[in-house]
Image: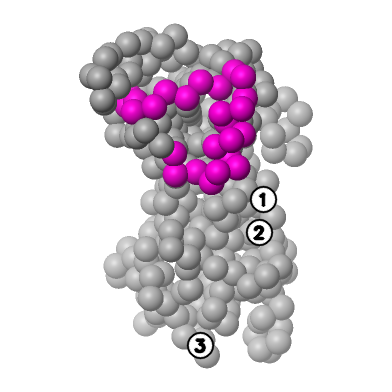
């Protein structure tokens, strides 16, 4: 027999837990499945200093535990498990299969599956990911490298934005571009090339990130001349894109060419009534914990109104 719930939240992190807080306070008895990475990307973030309410900053995993506790306090049923199949209906309810064997029929579904940063795939990259100097978010972590020399890897708008942002707080920014041209928009390229403390290294690839417990340098190679050299740096920012965790919804929900879920203007509504999207699964612009939490709130309020209109609240 399938389990029936009013509100099913797929995924955790700031969006999922905030949706849980609002939905449970509205007496909707939400069930939240944490997914393959409980707590989302912040569980691999050492220090969070830009989330309101933490004047001294907070450890990323601790912040996620705090949000989980808050959601549970109001009655969110937080469970371990991964949604492995979905079957959305224009009329509802929506069928979701968890861990390939548990079937749930949900009147509303809130998607908060997030996105995952793309990495270079180097062993040395993995070594320094967790607070050692390798990161995929300049806005999140740039503050810790103020006055230092850093590297940004990438050639698109995101890489240019990260390099420009870091140039305002860091001593020197090296932008490593694998080819002899960027794919970023012209205005972003001009901004980078016109910034005095940004140096673009063309046809350049990363061979190894150097250091013991923290990043102290990077070994790079020019793929045209084969010249290899080391740069002395303290921070390494990977800006080659993110992949939204939305593959399971392909063919059922509208998404852009990169897989980000498309929501209706000023709402969390998808193209399927009763299915709502929040957090980084639908946001490729801001990608911050505070904006994810905001859209989690939106999704819960949208779900509450939908259920009320259907007489199901």
Residue matched to label 1: 291
200 on left or right of 121: right
Confirm or deny contact between disc 1 and disc 2 (CB under 8 A). yes
Above or below for 154 versus 313 = above
Q: Residue 54's image quarter?
A: top right
Q: Secondary structure at mark 1?
A: helix
124 on left or right of 45: left
Residue matched to label 2: 295
Query: Which badge, 2 or 3, is on the more N-terminal residue?
Result: 3
The residues tagged by marks 1 and 2 sit, at their Cα atoms, a distance apart of: 6 Å
The x and y percentages for residue 49 are 67, 30
What's drawn in magenta, residue-wise?
182-206
Residue 75 is covered by the magenta coloring: no
Query: Which badge, 1 or 3, is on the more N-terminal residue?
Result: 3
The residues tagged by marks 2 and 3 sit, at their Cα atoms, a distance apart of: 22 Å
Residue 253 seen: yes
Above or below for 31 versus 165 = below
| Quadrant into which the N terminus falls | bottom left
Residue matched to label 3: 90
The x and y percentages for residue 16 are 57, 56
Q: Secondary structure at mark 3?
A: loop
Residue 204 is covered by the magenta coloring: yes
Q: Residue 168's image quarter?
A: top right
């Amino acid at each position: 027999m399938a389990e029936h719930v009013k509100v099913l939240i797929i995924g955790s992190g700031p969006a999922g837990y905030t949706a849980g807080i609002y939905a449970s306070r509205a007496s909707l008895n939400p069930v939240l499945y944490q997914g393959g990475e409980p707590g989302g990307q912040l569980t691999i973030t050492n220090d969070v200093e830009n989330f309101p309410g933490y004047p001294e900053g907070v450890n990323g995993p601790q912040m996620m535990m705090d949000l989980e506790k808050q959601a549970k306090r109001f009655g969110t049923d937080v469970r371990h498990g991964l949604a492995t199949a979905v079957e959305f209906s224009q009329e509802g309810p929506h069928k979701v299969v968890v861990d390939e064997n548990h079937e749930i029929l949900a009147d509303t579904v809130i998607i908060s599956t997030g996105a995952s940063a793309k990495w270079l795939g180097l062993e040395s990259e993995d070594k320094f990911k967790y607070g050692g100097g390798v990161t995929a978010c300049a806005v999140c972590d740039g503050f810790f490298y103020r006055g230092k020399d850093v590297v940004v890897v990438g050639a698109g708008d995101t890489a240019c934005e990260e390099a420009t942002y870091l140039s305002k707080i860091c001593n020197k920014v090296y932008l490593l571009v694998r080819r002899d041209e960027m794919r970023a928009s012209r205005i972003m390229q001009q901004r980078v090339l016109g910034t005095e403390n940004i140096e673009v290294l063309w046809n350049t690839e990363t061979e190894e990130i150097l250091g013991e417990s923290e990043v102290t340098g990077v070994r790079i190679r020019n793929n045209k001349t084969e010249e290899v050299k080391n740069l002395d740096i303290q921070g390494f920012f990977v800006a080659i894109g993110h992949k939204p965790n939305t593959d399971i919804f392909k063919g059922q929900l509208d998404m852009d060419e990169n897989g980000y879920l498309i929501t209706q203007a000023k709402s969390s509504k998808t193209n399927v009534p009763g299915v709502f999207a929040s957090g980084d699964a639908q946001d490729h612009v801001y990608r911050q914990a505070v904006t994810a939490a905001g859209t989690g709130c939106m999704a819960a309020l949208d779900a509450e109104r939908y259920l009320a209109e259907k007489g199901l609240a």
